[in-house]
Image: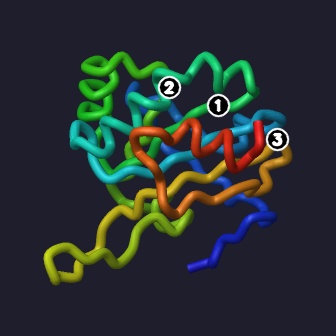
């Protein structure tokens, strides 16, 4: 683990979105990015978070923020998720968990007393110069956009 902190340079990554197109952080130089990590398409918490970002997407864009989601789901799963919920942003398929690990969004979780490795729901706000501006370790799935606005004071 690299132990990412606010103020650190955001690690560059290259992945593939729902359409099989290459996407990297470098493509967003000069733009602010909301990079959010979530466990699984079509699950209640992940759907609530994606729909909250969708419902506020035009406002986020007006504030200069580009939204990118990352999960281990396949491109096909992402395509269906996007279509079902009319999501306007790109979703990266990370089945090898390279980006998840790079951003410390893969790790130990506990459920019903059992410990296992899984996706840690996190959001990174990455500034125009690709510095980590804010890290959200506890995401309010149903009100994530307001959570972002309150922390960034915008």
**Residue 139, image x and y in percent?**
47, 53
Marks 3 and 1 in Cβ contact (< 8 Å)? no
Above or below — where is 1 with respect to 121? below
Which residue in the protein does label 3 denote?
Answer: 128
Q: Position of residue 56 (x, y in %)?
A: 54, 23
Quadrant in the picture for the C terminus: top right
Q: Position of residue 89 (x, y in %)?
A: 50, 26
Query: Quadrant location of residue 121?
Result: bottom left
Q: Secondary structure at mark 1?
A: strand
Whether residue 90 is situated above or below residue 7 in the rendered picture:
above
Nearest the eye: 18 or 53: 53
1 and 2 marks in contact (CB < 8 Å): yes
x 70%, y 56%: residue: 134
In the rendered image, which residue does mark 1 sit on?
Answer: 66
Query: In this figure, what is the number of numbered marks?
Result: 3
The answer to which image quadrant residue 17 occupies is top left
Residue 88 vs residue 131: left or right? left
């Amino acid at each position: 683990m690299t132990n990412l902190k606010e103020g650190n340079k955001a690690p560059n990554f290259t992945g593939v979105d729902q359409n099989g197109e290459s996407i990297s952080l470098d493509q967003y130089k000069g733009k602010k990015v909301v990079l959010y990590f979530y466990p699984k398409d079509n699950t209640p918490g992940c759907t609530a978070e994606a729909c909250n970002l969708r419902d506020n997407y035009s406002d986020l864009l007006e504030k200069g923020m580009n939204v990118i989601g990352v999960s281990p789901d396949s491109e096909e799963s992402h395509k269906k998720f996007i279509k079902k919920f009319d999501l306007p942003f790109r979703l990266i398929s990370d089945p090898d968990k390279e980006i998840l690990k790079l951003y410390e969004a893969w790790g130990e979780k506990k459920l019903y007393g059992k410990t296992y490795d899984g996706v840690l729901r996190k959001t990174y706000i990455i500034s125009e110069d690709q510095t980590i501006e804010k890290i959200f370790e506890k995401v309010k799935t149903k009100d994530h956009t307001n959570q972002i606005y309150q922390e960034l004071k915008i």
